Amino acid sequence: MPRASFAEELESAADRIADMSRADLQIILRRTALMLRNVAGVPLEPATDDALNSTAAEMKIGRSDLIQIILREWLETNAYLPVHEIDDDTHTDRSA
């Protein structure tokens, strides 16, 4: 099951927790624990990990979103990906 639909199932369960049976809740929680155990992460040095977390919080985005932005920009800068061009019609909130 894809993570997005799994997250939706968890949110739905949280919304109707009073109506769920104990067995159904146990199944969802066990599947969640299994998925979390199997998530492959990239081990980072503590200083790098702290910098990512604080930057993501400052930018008010998720850590994984920040990592995707950093990787995409590095790949574009080093010519591994074509540069993502911004349309002149793109509206911004005056931030860089």
Image (cartoon, grey):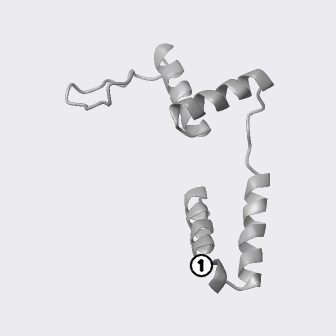
* Residue 77 higher or lower than 88, as above or below: above
- Amino acid type at circle 1 is Arg
Q: Is residue 67 visible?
A: no
Q: Which residue sits furthest left?
A: 89
Residue 88 lies in what quarter of the image?
top left
* Residue 5 higher or lower than 25, as above or below: above
Query: Label 1: few (<14), some or many (≥20) within 10 Å?
Result: few
Residue 56 image point, x, y percent = 58, 32
Residue that appears at 78% across and 60% down: 34
Residue 18 lies in what quarter of the image?
bottom right
* Residue 85 higher or lower than 91, as above or below: above
Local SS, label 1: loop
* Residue 59 higher or lower than 40, as above or below: above
User: Number of numbered discs present?
Assistant: 1
Identify the image quadrant of the N terminus.
Answer: bottom right
In this image, 90 relative to 6: left or right? Answer: left
In this image, 69 relative to 53: left or right? Answer: left
Q: Which residue is mark 1?
A: 16
Frontmost residue, 45 versus 14:
14
Q: Is residue 73 visible?
A: yes
Residue 74 image point, x, y percent = 53, 19
Identify the image quadrant of the C terminus.
Answer: top left
Residue that appears at 72% across and 63% down: 32
Residue that appears at 54% across and 37% down: 65
